[in-house]
Protein backbone atom coordinates (compact mmCIF):
# COMPACT_ATOMS: atom_id res chain seq x y z
CA UNK A 1 0.00 0.00 0.00
CA UNK A 2 1.34 3.40 -0.95
CA UNK A 3 1.67 6.16 1.62
CA UNK A 4 0.17 8.45 -1.03
CA UNK A 5 -3.60 8.15 -0.57
CA UNK A 6 -4.70 11.57 -1.84
CA UNK A 7 -7.21 11.65 1.05
CA UNK A 8 -5.54 14.77 2.46
CA UNK A 9 -5.69 16.72 -0.77
CA UNK A 10 -8.84 18.48 0.41
CA UNK A 11 -7.13 19.92 3.53
CA UNK A 12 -8.57 17.32 5.91
CA UNK A 13 -7.06 14.29 7.57
CA UNK A 14 -8.41 11.03 8.96
CA UNK A 15 -8.58 10.71 12.74
CA UNK A 16 -8.64 7.68 14.98
CA UNK A 17 -12.03 6.04 15.54
CA UNK A 18 -13.34 7.42 12.28
CA UNK A 19 -14.05 10.87 11.01
CA UNK A 20 -11.96 13.60 9.51
CA UNK A 21 -10.82 17.01 10.66
CA UNK A 22 -9.14 20.00 9.03
CA UNK A 23 -5.36 19.87 8.95
CA UNK A 24 -5.43 23.32 10.53
CA UNK A 25 -7.40 22.12 13.57
CA UNK A 26 -5.67 22.64 16.94
CA UNK A 27 -5.36 18.86 17.43
CA UNK A 28 -3.55 18.32 14.13
CA UNK A 29 -1.35 21.39 14.57
CA UNK A 30 -0.34 20.32 18.10
CA UNK A 31 0.40 16.79 16.92
CA UNK A 32 2.53 18.18 14.09
CA UNK A 33 4.52 20.36 16.50
CA UNK A 34 5.24 17.36 18.71
CA UNK A 35 6.27 15.39 15.62
CA UNK A 36 8.66 18.20 14.69
CA UNK A 37 10.04 18.17 18.24
CA UNK A 38 10.60 14.42 17.97
CA UNK A 39 12.57 14.93 14.74
CA UNK A 40 14.67 17.71 16.30
CA UNK A 41 15.50 15.42 19.22
CA UNK A 42 16.65 12.88 16.64
CA UNK A 43 19.18 15.47 15.48
CA UNK A 44 20.28 15.98 19.08
CA UNK A 45 20.81 12.21 19.43
CA UNK A 46 23.24 12.07 16.51
CA UNK A 47 25.09 15.31 17.30
CA UNK A 48 27.60 13.87 19.74
CA UNK A 49 25.83 14.50 23.05
CA UNK A 50 26.80 12.23 25.96
CA UNK A 51 25.31 8.72 25.95
CA UNK A 52 23.46 9.39 29.23
CA UNK A 53 21.58 12.23 27.51
CA UNK A 54 20.89 10.04 24.45
CA UNK A 55 19.32 7.40 26.70
CA UNK A 56 17.02 9.95 28.31
CA UNK A 57 16.13 11.42 24.93
CA UNK A 58 15.17 7.94 23.73
CA UNK A 59 12.70 7.66 26.61
CA UNK A 60 11.44 11.19 25.94
CA UNK A 61 10.85 10.30 22.29
CA UNK A 62 8.78 7.29 23.36
CA UNK A 63 6.69 9.65 25.49
CA UNK A 64 6.32 12.03 22.54
CA UNK A 65 4.88 9.26 20.39
CA UNK A 66 2.33 8.61 23.14
CA UNK A 67 1.68 12.32 23.35
CA UNK A 68 1.01 12.57 19.61
CA UNK A 69 -1.62 9.86 19.92
CA UNK A 70 -3.25 11.56 22.87
CA UNK A 71 -3.30 14.98 21.21
CA UNK A 72 -4.61 13.76 17.88
CA UNK A 73 -7.70 12.03 19.26
CA UNK A 74 -10.72 14.35 19.40
CA UNK A 75 -11.81 15.09 22.97
CA UNK A 76 -15.08 13.21 22.54
CA UNK A 77 -13.10 10.03 21.70
CA UNK A 78 -10.37 10.40 24.34
CA UNK A 79 -12.06 8.20 26.96
CA UNK A 80 -12.34 5.39 24.40
CA UNK A 81 -8.70 5.92 23.41
CA UNK A 82 -7.58 5.58 27.03
CA UNK A 83 -9.90 2.66 27.84
CA UNK A 84 -8.56 0.83 24.77
CA UNK A 85 -5.15 0.91 26.50
CA UNK A 86 -3.31 3.41 24.33
CA UNK A 87 -0.45 5.13 26.13
CA UNK A 88 -0.93 8.50 27.74
CA UNK A 89 1.03 11.03 29.75
CA UNK A 90 0.48 11.12 33.49
CA UNK A 91 1.89 12.24 36.80
CA UNK A 92 4.59 9.53 36.80
CA UNK A 93 5.94 10.94 33.54
CA UNK A 94 5.94 14.47 34.96
CA UNK A 95 7.72 13.22 38.09
CA UNK A 96 10.35 11.51 35.91
CA UNK A 97 11.05 14.76 34.03
CA UNK A 98 11.25 16.68 37.29
CA UNK A 99 13.76 14.14 38.62
CA UNK A 100 15.98 14.85 35.59
CA UNK A 101 15.78 18.58 36.25
CA UNK A 102 16.57 18.05 39.94
CA UNK A 103 19.89 16.43 38.96
CA UNK A 104 21.03 19.49 36.99
CA UNK A 105 22.20 22.92 38.07
CA UNK A 106 19.33 25.36 37.67
CA UNK A 107 21.03 28.71 38.13
CA UNK A 108 19.97 31.21 35.48
CA UNK A 109 23.14 32.77 34.07
CA UNK A 110 21.51 35.06 31.54
CA UNK A 111 20.03 34.62 28.11
CA UNK A 112 21.59 32.08 25.82
CA UNK A 113 23.04 32.74 22.40
CA UNK A 114 22.52 29.33 20.80
CA UNK A 115 25.51 28.19 18.81
CA UNK A 116 27.94 30.67 20.38
CA UNK A 117 29.90 27.88 22.07
CA UNK A 118 30.31 26.04 18.76
CA UNK A 119 28.72 22.84 20.04
CA UNK A 120 26.29 21.23 17.55
CA UNK A 121 24.56 19.22 20.28
CA UNK A 122 23.85 22.35 22.32
CA UNK A 123 22.59 24.21 19.24
CA UNK A 124 20.27 21.35 18.29
CA UNK A 125 19.12 21.12 21.91
CA UNK A 126 18.15 24.80 21.75
CA UNK A 127 16.32 24.19 18.47
CA UNK A 128 14.41 21.33 20.09
CA UNK A 129 13.65 23.57 23.08
CA UNK A 130 12.04 26.26 20.93
CA UNK A 131 10.01 23.67 19.04
CA UNK A 132 8.94 22.22 22.38
CA UNK A 133 7.71 25.65 23.53
CA UNK A 134 5.66 25.97 20.33
CA UNK A 135 4.30 22.45 20.82
CA UNK A 136 3.21 23.37 24.35
CA UNK A 137 1.46 26.52 23.13
CA UNK A 138 -0.23 24.53 20.37
CA UNK A 139 -1.41 21.94 22.88
CA UNK A 140 -2.84 24.65 25.15
CA UNK A 141 -4.53 26.13 22.07
CA UNK A 142 -6.74 23.03 21.99
CA UNK A 143 -8.81 24.71 24.71
CA UNK A 144 -11.21 22.27 26.35
CA UNK A 145 -9.54 19.45 24.41
CA UNK A 146 -6.12 20.11 25.89
CA UNK A 147 -4.64 17.35 28.03
CA UNK A 148 -3.25 19.27 30.98
CA UNK A 149 -0.71 16.56 31.73
CA UNK A 150 0.46 16.69 28.12
CA UNK A 151 0.85 20.46 28.33
CA UNK A 152 2.72 20.19 31.63
CA UNK A 153 4.98 17.49 30.14
CA UNK A 154 5.96 19.82 27.30
CA UNK A 155 6.50 22.69 29.73
CA UNK A 156 8.84 20.61 31.91
CA UNK A 157 10.60 19.20 28.87
CA UNK A 158 11.40 22.63 27.42
CA UNK A 159 13.03 23.59 30.72
CA UNK A 160 15.13 20.43 30.69
CA UNK A 161 16.19 21.01 27.10
CA UNK A 162 17.31 24.52 28.09
CA UNK A 163 19.33 23.14 30.99
CA UNK A 164 20.93 20.42 28.83
CA UNK A 165 21.89 22.98 26.20
CA UNK A 166 23.59 25.12 28.84
CA UNK A 167 25.47 22.08 30.21
CA UNK A 168 26.63 21.13 26.72
CA UNK A 169 27.83 24.69 26.09
CA UNK A 170 29.77 24.73 29.33
CA UNK A 171 31.40 21.40 28.44
CA UNK A 172 32.34 22.80 25.02
CA UNK A 173 34.07 25.71 26.74
Image (tube, helix red, strand yellow):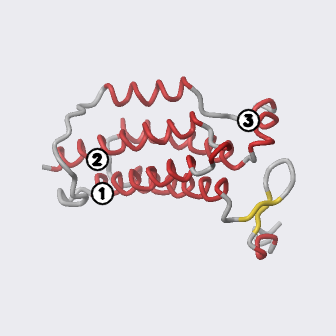
Pointer 2 with pointer 1, Cβ within 8 A: yes
Quadrant holding the N terminus: bottom right
Q: Position of residue 164 (x, y in %)?
A: 30, 42
How much space separates mark 1 and mark 3, taking CA atoms? 34 Å
Task: State the residue at coordinates (81%, 70%).
Answer: 7
Task: State the residue at coordinates (22%, 53%).
Answer: 112
For residue 167, which numbered disc appears in the image?
none
Q: Position of residue 102 (x, y in %)?
A: 32, 25
Badge 2: residue crowd in 10 Å (few <14, some 14–19, many ≥20): many
Residue closer to the observer: 108 or 66: 108
Residue occupied by mark 2:
165
Task: State the residue at coordinates (30%, 57%).
Answer: 123
- Considering only order in the chain, which callout, 1 or 2, is on the residue closer to the N terminus? 1
How much space separates mark 2 and mark 3, taking CA atoms? 32 Å
Looking at the rendering, which quadrant does residue 161 occupy?
Answer: top left
For residue 86, which numbered disc appears in the image?
3
Pointer 1 with pointer 3, Cβ within 8 A: no
How much space separates mark 2 and mark 1, taking CA atoms? 7 Å
For residue 123, which numbered disc appears in the image?
1
- Considering only order in the chain, which callout, 3 or 1, is on the residue closer to the N terminus? 3
Task: State the residue at coordinates (25%, 58%).
Answer: 114
Q: Is residue 147 above or below residue 42?
A: above
Q: Is residue 146 above or below residue 30?
A: above
Amino acid sequence: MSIITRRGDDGNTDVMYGGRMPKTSPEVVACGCVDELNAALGMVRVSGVPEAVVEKIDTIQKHLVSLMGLLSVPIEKRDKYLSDGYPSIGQDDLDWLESIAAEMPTKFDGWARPGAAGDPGAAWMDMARTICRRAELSAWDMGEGASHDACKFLNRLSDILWLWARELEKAAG
